[in-house]
Image (spheres, rainbow, N blue to C red):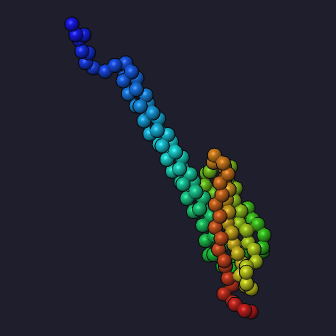
Amino acid sequence: MRPARRHGATLISALMSMFLLTVGITIVLQSYLVGSHSVRLSSQRNAVTLALQSQLEALIAAGYGQLPSPGARAVPTSALPAVPAISGQVLVAKGPVANTRTVTAAASWNERGPRQEQLTILMTSGRWGR
């Protein structure tokens, strides 16, 4: 007499299916977390860049004659976005040629490690060779 054939899933196939489903869900959730962190970091970097650009544009609007003497100046915290442990500075230095100044606006903050953004412009007095 032949043994009766069994139809359906075995316990091992059910366990393997649950394992593969768990691994798949874990991979999807991990990629979501990485993407979420990247979006937040990108948003912070954009906010900091806009704040630094605003600082430089204010100096450009004031003109070359109103630039402070060479040296570093702290950027007021109120001018920077709400990012953890952020600080900023504007550095005015003599330019590479006469009647120029190099102006650098920089900010650093701590979001899962040190981050930094920096923008530099070259301002001229408009009088070359004098």
Query: In the displayed image of the protein, which residue is found farthest to the front?
Result: 1
Q: Quadrant of the N terminus?
A: top left
Q: Quadrant of the C terminus?
A: bottom right
Which residue is more in the foreground, 44 or 6?
Answer: 6
Percent coordinates x, y for residue 78 in the rendering: 65, 56
Quadrant location of residue 24?
top left
- Can I make out residue 78 in this image? no
* Residue 92, horizontal then vertical, whole percent: 73, 72
Q: Position of residue 16 (x, y in %)?
A: 40, 26
Q: Is residue 120 above or below residue 85?
A: below
Residue 71 as seen in the image, left or right of residue 39 = right
Q: Is residue 37 visible?
A: yes
The picture quadrant where one finds residue 118 is: bottom right
Question: Which residue is outermost to the left?
Answer: 1
Give the residue at x 69% y 59%: 88
How many numbered marks, from 0 up? 0
Q: Is residue 33 left or right of residue 85?
A: left
Image position, residue 20 (x, y; %): 41, 31
**What's the residue at 62%, 75% (across, down)?**
61
Q: Judge whether 26 appears above or below 37 on screen.
A: above
Foreground of the two, 28 or 72: 28
Q: Please give the name of the residue rendered at 65% of the width and 74% of the height, measured from the top-left corner.
A: 121
Q: Which residue lies at the image location 63% right of the left edge and 57% below the top edge?
A: 80
> As drawn, which residue projects farthest toward the top?
1
